[in-house]
Amino acid sequence: MANPVMNSIVKDWSTQQATPAGYPAMPGYQPASQQAPNPYGGSTNPYAQGGAGNAAQNTYPAPQGAPVYGVPQGQQGAYADSMASYEAMMNAPAADAVDRGTMTFDDVVVKSIMCFGLLLVGATAGWMTGIVAMGLALVLFFASCAVTAGLALFIQFSKKIRPGAIVTYSLIEGFSLGVISYTFEAFFPGIVISAVLATLVVIGTTLAAFMLGFVRNSSTLTRVAGIGSVAFFFYYLVTFALSVTGMVDMRAVNSTTVFGIPLGVIIAVLAVFIGVLCLVRDFDAVKVGVASNVPVKYAWLCTFAIMTDVIWIYLEILRILSYLMRRN
């Protein structure tokens, strides 16, 4: 159904007088042939010298090297140089993120490949140490855990971004993972390759869901991920203290079934869920950082966050598989 108000406006617009170029004439418009005579006399610019003939002559550009109007005679060369520099700047290609020193997705990918490569190198060293001398591997394992815990706190609370600390953390944490993986493999053959594949599936699915828009970061997700991470941090501290002191047999507690499911499996599945939420938060941080043109150094922090969450997910999947294999 037509709008009567719009029809009236269109009708009035169509009956308006038009300029020679076809545009609607404004109120008071007069064609050039009907315009009032110039009060200064003549039909040319009243400030032009020499009348219409001279005005026609002035339409040609000044020859190269001629004095520029408004520029003192002694500054003509400097003016020409500045204009040449300005034209070169305007004709130059636009600066990209690399030229501006801002973070890109490639920066995060390259640094992630480097850190995960060092993680793999350290894991290989830890695995081989376990094969050669298990006692020495355990001693180095506890020492490496203390070092990586200190490095993690240093990276998190340092006022500056420490790429060297992140690289060192990757290598030493890899050694710890290698010793842990070898220990699990000794008791449950085939568990490591299963845990690695399951971790890759979880990470790939999370990344695909995030890129396709099925999962998005939000204030609620960030809050749940933060609270869950802190809760599990204290849970690990308490259970470790209880196990070391012998006050509670955590293996018996984790083997307790709830609706036929071991309590350890339920806790580990919940930990994997929180780890996935943390991964979504990390992916969103990378996306927002690239869009906000943050400095390139923040790619190290994004890499560190992703790496620690991936390690956490792998360890929890390793626990889940160990409980399932133990029951079989």
Image: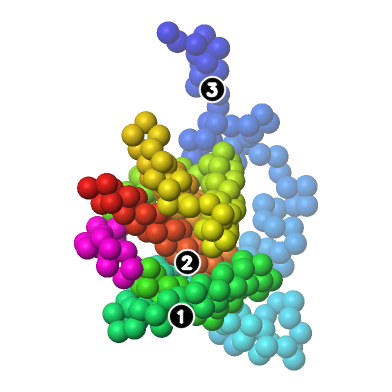
Q: Secondary structure at mark 1?
A: helix
Question: Which segment did they paint magenta?
Answer: 181-197
Whichever of labels 1 and 3 marks the residue nearer the N terminus, that label is: 3
Image depth: mark 2 or mark 1 in front = 1
Q: Is residue 34 magenta?
A: no
Q: Can the viewer see residue 203 in this picture?
A: no
How far is disc 1 from disc 3 in space, using C-alphas? 87 Å
For label 1, count other residues whose C-alpha is less than 10 Å away and answer few (under 14), some (14-19) or many (20+): some
Q: Are marks 2 and 1 in contact (CB under 8 Å)?
A: no
For label 3, count other residues whose C-alpha is less than 10 Å away and answer few (under 14), some (14-19) or many (20+): few
* Residue named by callout 3: 13
Main SS, magenta residues: helix
> Considering depth in this image, is 206 or 287 the residue closer to the camera?
206
Residue 30 placement, left or right of 271: right
Whichever of labels 2 and 1 marks the residue nearer the N terminus, that label is: 1
What's the residue at 49%, 11% (across, down)? 3
Image depth: mark 3 or mark 2 in front = 2
* Residue named by callout 2: 303
Residue 37 placement (x, y as % from top left): 71, 44
> Considering depth in this image, is 328 or 245 the residue closer to the camera?
245
Residue 81 placement (x, y as % from top left): 62, 86
Whichever of labels 3 and 2 marks the residue nearer the N terminus, that label is: 3
What's the residue at 44%, 58% (across, down)? 312
For label 2, count other residues whose C-alpha is less than 10 Å away and answer few (under 14), some (14-19) or many (20+): many
Numbered label attached to residue 306:
none
Label 1 is placed on what type of residue? Leu
* Residue named by callout 1: 140
Q: Is residue 183 magenta?
A: yes
How far is disc 2 from disc 1 in space, using C-alphas? 26 Å
Residue 192 placement (x, y as % from top left): 27, 63
How far is disc 3 from disc 2 in space, using C-alphas? 61 Å
Residue 196 placement, left or right of 52: left
